Image (cartoon, coloured by chain):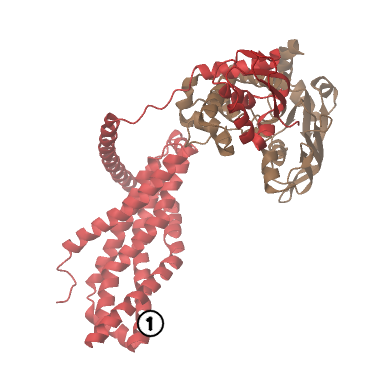
Amino acid sequence: MNGRPVIDMRGIVTRFGANVVHDGIDLSVTRGEVVALVGGSGTGKTTLLRHIIGLTRPAAGDVSIFGAPLFSGSINEQRTRRRRFGVLFQHGALFSALNVAENIGFPLRELRIASKDEIHNLVALKLAMVELEPATALLMPAELSGGMIKRVALARALALEPELLLLDEPTAGLDPDRSAAFVELVRSLQNQLGLTVVLVTHDVDTLAALATKIAVLADRRIVSYASLEETMEVDHPFIDRFFRGPHGRRALARSGGDH
Amino acid sequence: MRSPAIKTEIATEPGASHSFRLQGDWTLRALAPRLATLRAELGGAPTDARWLLDDVARLDSFGATLLWHAWGQRWPAAISVADELRQIIARVADSAVEPLPAAPPFTAVDAIIVLGRAMLSFRDHALDFIRLMGQLCLDVAYLLQHPRDWPLKEISANVYKVGLKATPVAALVGFLIGIVLSYLSALQLRAFGADIYIVNILGLGIVRELGPVLVSVLVAGRSGSAMTAQLGVMRVTEELDALSAMGISRTLRLVLPKVIALTLAMPLLVLWTSGVALLGGMVSAWMQLDLGMAFFIDRLPQVVPVSNLYIGFAKGAVFGLLIALVASHFGLRVRPNTESLSANTTASVVSSITIVILVDAVFAIATRSIGVPR
């Protein structure tokens, strides 16, 4: 089981009307990797992530996760498969009618297997994991700051003990300080829980600190899929601008000590 | 993935207790299918049991929580566990020490507070509503001085949306109500041989009363809710704030066009719906009582004074004004969450229908000597 890729995408083609976004994309993620999807805006990073979640379906090609096609098997099998990954949406997507504790406990309560005390305990644990005070439990999503929303959403994504974590722009909208703290949090959780992580980002700091592999989307395909050092060697105009531009160079210099 | 299991070893030597050897993956996914049996087995363990966790392949926080609560939230006296797993359980144990703050229970004092809040919120609503109307008056005064700023495009778009697009459903409802009303009245009138009075009943009833109220209920449900929801979502997506930031008055650009459009469109909708309802009544009277359509049309202006039509128009305009005002009032009160959006949309429709019926009663009293032949 360990040898099989967690995510396996073959020949993905995506069209929006006449606009071809992906033209034959292959991507394979093995267990324990942290893969960053980068690319200019409109290159379909988030769309690729939505294909993995199963919110959209590609015009052609296959998406397999945990060794089976995403939409294969009975409804029960599909549901079980979905519960093996957690998703952090770009804006958190917390349920605005529920408070923080109810939001985090929601997936567990839906499973109907844990007792009330256990759910309380697990919610407290997840809150501690994402470094939030227990007092935040009673707050409503509207009362949270941007950074707290991301943390609560991450706690909710972790509620069902996922093996795979999908993050859409985890640090977008956070100030550099909080963004660094959030990246650090994701990294420590990834180490602690042995997660496989796929993240979409266009923040060089984030991917330099987190990613073990980088998939660069450009010209409707993946032009490079390698570690940061190897990606830097690839000759492509986008990579040139993204990593070797003034901001990219600064960010890489900052994180140089970590690698 | 290895299925989790518990192997019980009965103690052979005296003085020693049962040992429980846990095996397999103790993760949420592995545990879920056989949770009930495992829970029962864990629950049946005596307090002095020995716990051997050395064979556990994987443990996640759900598995750790399950064990911790089965142990009564304390470490068993005799346990053999690898350090790594002990850490996972310790983390669960730490978070169990400090329980989540619970929402305070509801007491008699809270009941009084809720009641007081309801009163105050009623005052808030009244003040807000008056403020909105005042702002609209100021906007109109401003527009009279600056005629180039009239939001004509918005008004026209709103007239199309709330007026023209409502005609099919208004016609359908009107026609059916006309048929039903005519059919029921015809049965009674025939018993007295007063067939001909069907024209009076339908004419007065529909033109003066039923047309305006029917259209109001329809429009409150159809356009009032849409207006509240639109303004509410604009609040959620910060579009209202964007307008304010550009120095554009939200009442002038969003509320006033809706209010003017509905005030203009409602009398027309009333005319249209009353007409179609009368047509339905006419068809039914013709089939039920053999009353010719030409006769019906001929007799209608004789028995229904034209002032009734004006009353119907006036009601339509006033009801339209009220519905748009109430809808905008609630729309602007939406706070950025889904609960508030649904509560305000409901409140908007319920209040506007209630207000329309209240004002209709006022109309009935105020116009009791106008247009009713004696």
Give the structural element (helix, strand or loop) at label 1: helix
* Picture coordinates of residue A98, whole percent (x, y): 48, 35
Disc 1 marks a residue whose amino acid type is Val
Chain to which mark 1 belongs? B
Q: Residue at x 37, y 43 (%)?
A: B251
Q: Quadrant of the N terminus of chain A?
A: top right
* Picture coordinates of residue A245, whole percent (x, y): 74, 21
Q: Is residue A172 visible?
A: no
Quarter location, residue A131: top right
Read off the residue under disc 1.
B283
Q: Nearer the viewer, residue A49 or B364?
A: A49
- Shown colour of chain A: brown
Q: Where B318 sits versus A210, above or below?
A: below
- Can you tell which chain is drawn red? B
Whether residue B151 sits left or right of residue A245 in the image: it is left
Q: Quadrant of the C terminus of chain A?
A: top right
Quarter location, residue B105: top left
Whether residue A172 sits left or right of residue A100 in the image: it is right
* Picture coordinates of residue B179, whole percent (x, y): 37, 77
Q: Nearer the viewer, residue B349 or B8?
A: B8
Q: Residue at x 20, y 58 (%)?
A: B362
* Picture coordinates of residue B252, whole percent (x, y): 38, 44
Q: Is residue A102 visible?
A: yes
Q: Nearer the viewer, residue A83 or B178?
A: A83
Whether residue A115 sits left or right of residue B258 in the image: it is right
Q: Nearer the viewer, residue B47 or A238?
A: B47
